[in-house]
Image (tube, grey):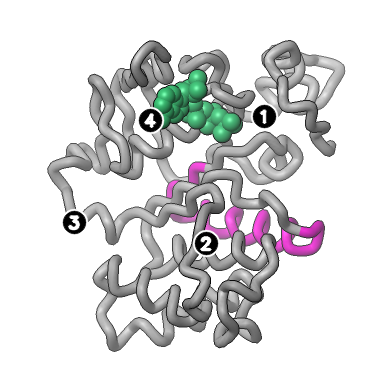
Amino acid sequence: MLKLKEIKKAYKKTQALEGVSLSLGPGVYALLGPNGAGKSTMMNIITGNLKPKSGQVLWKGEDTEKLGRCFRRILGYAPQQQGLYDVFTGRRFLSYMAALKEIPPSRTHAEIERTAAAVNLTAKLDKKLSTYSGGMKQRILIAQALLGAPELLVMDEPTAGLDPKERIRVRELLAQEGKQKVVLIATHVVSDVEGIAKEMILLKKGRIVAQGDPADLIARFAPTGTMEDVYLQLFGEDETDGQTYPR
Ligand SMILES: Nc1ncnc2c1ncn2[C@@H]1O[C@H](COP(=O)(O)OP(=O)(O)OP(=O)(O)O)[C@@H](O)[C@H]1O
């Protein structure tokens, strides 16, 4: 349903994507790679926030650039956390996002209730975003991506800052969504995706260096190990952010 054809992107001197091609049907896909691998660039190109230097993004065979506004109803995007409208309540924020997505006003209330419940924020909907914790802000971003039940979900680090309980809830939610939709998740946290991903897409310096079912990748790159070992095998020396990654 979603196809990337030879996507290339450069920022001045940095070659961020060096010809990425992909074909994704319904299911959860994990996009893994170290800092600077090109994950956010790829997501921004899929969502139309950035133009590639060359290549095409196709949805059901149609160029997403040509789909224009229609693509807004097909796509749900949760970007990495950034400034939210702090004076808005959660409800007002979701209502504003629903309007941008051109969800009919008659459906907006039900969609807000449905998506807030999915991320366990029903009780906080009428509180201002300025009072939300980091994890709650993350969850409202996920909720807005689910508005209108889009067929394509693109999530940039969706579990960042979530406590273990909410992390599990979001993981289960995305697994559920992946039964019928294309769900692409960029993350550093292998354990958040290995149990739910149909495929892992491993990106390094703007190229896909491995792609496949987690069990196949383990057999290929770390036969006695785990998906975490595959990650370390492919990217070990590239991780420069000093974080440790939970199993
Ligand atoms: N606006 C920009 N201007 C110049 N270079 C950029 C810009 N955005 C990204 N880059 C560079 O492009 C490359 C890919 O960056 P990108 O943000 O896509 O990686 P990433 O995999 O999402 O990293 P992270 O895990 O840190 O979010 C990096 O070398 C980065 O420095």
- Amino acid carrying label 4: it is Ser
Please say if 52 is above or below 192. Answer: above
Residue drawn where x is 17% and y is 50% of the image: 68
Residue drawn where x is 84% and y is 37% of the image: 247
Q: Earlier in the sequence, mark 4 or mark 1?
A: 4
The label number, if any, that marks residue 214 in the structure image: 1
Q: CA distance from mark 2 to mark 4?
A: 26 Å
Q: Earlier in the sequence, mark 3 or mark 2?
A: 3
Residue drawn where x is 28% and y is 67% of the image: 100
The crowding category of the residue bearing disc 3, from other C-alpha atoms within 10 Å (few below 14, some 14 to 19, many at least 20), is: few
Disc 4: which residue: 23
**Camera-nearest residue between 245 and 148:** 245
Report the mark closest to the observer, 3 or 1: 3
- Left or right, 231 with reference to 25: right
- Amino acid carrying label 1: it is Pro
The crowding category of the residue bearing disc 2, from other C-alpha atoms within 10 Å (few below 14, some 14 to 19, many at least 20), is: many
The crowding category of the residue bearing disc 1, from other C-alpha atoms within 10 Å (few below 14, some 14 to 19, many at least 20), is: many
The label number, if any, that marks residue 69 in the structure image: 3
Q: CA distance from mark 4 to mark 1?
A: 17 Å
The label number, if any, that marks residue 144 in the structure image: none
* Residue at far left of view: 66
**Quadrant position of residue 129:** bottom right
